[in-house]
Image (cartoon, rainbow, N blue to C red):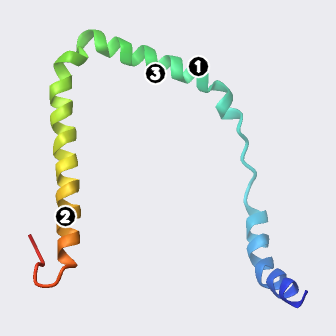
């Protein structure tokens, strides 16, 4: 009972600041289906000019390079915690 009163006293400024924030409406989500259709149409149109079969090898190479860099960074980070094995 005492702790609840103490917590409510300490949290009252936080609740006061939160009450000052404006309310957010979610009306913009109603039009999401229309926006999604527009995006699908745009990417379908781009696919007519630049087929995915031509871009797939380049996309795979870029993704593989980023995955390799992330894995190498994780290995170097783990290795730096082992004594006498710091760095690459």
Q: Quadrant of the C terminus?
A: bottom left
Residues at badges 2 and 1 in contact (C-beta under 8 Å)?
no
Residue 42 position by quadrant: top left
Mark 2 or mark 3: name the one nearer the start of the chain. 3
Front-most of 75 and 23?
75
- 18, above or below 58, in the image: below
- 13, above or below 26, in the image: below
Cα distance in 3D space between marks 2 and 1 = 45 Å
Residues at badges 2 and 3 in contact (C-beta under 8 Å)?
no
Q: Is the residue marked by circle 1 packed among few (<14), some (14-19), or many (20+) residues within 10 Å?
A: few
Instruction: Single out the residue that lies furthest toward the right.
Output: 1
Mark 3 or mark 1: name the one nearer the start of the chain. 1
Secondary structure state at the residue bearing disc 2: helix
Foreground tag (2 vs 1): 2
Q: Is the residue marked by circle 3 packed among few (<14), some (14-19), or many (20+) residues within 10 Å?
A: few
Mark 2 or mark 1: name the one nearer the start of the chain. 1
Residue 29 position by quadrant: top right
Q: Is residue 79 left or right of residue 21?
A: left
- Residue 75 numbered tag: 2
Residue 44 position by quadrant: top left
Please report the residue visible at 28 percent of the width from the left and 9 percent of the height from the top: 48
Residue with the mark numbered 3? 39
Secondary structure state at the residue bearing disc 1: helix
Residue with the mark numbered 1? 34
Secondary structure state at the residue bearing disc 3: helix
Q: Residue 68's x, y, as percent?
A: 17, 50
């Amino acid at each position: 009972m005492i702790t609840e009163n103490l917590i409510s006293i300490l949290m009252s400024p936080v609740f006061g600041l939160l009450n000052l924030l404006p309310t957010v409406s979610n009306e913009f989500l109603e039009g999401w289906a229309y926006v999604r259709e527009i995006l699908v149409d745009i990417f379908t149109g781009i696919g007519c000019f630049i087929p995915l079969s031509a871009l797939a090898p380049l996309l795979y190479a870029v993704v593989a390079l980023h995955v390799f860099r992330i894995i190498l960074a994780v290995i170097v980070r783990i290795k730096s915690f082992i004594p006498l094995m710091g760095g690459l």
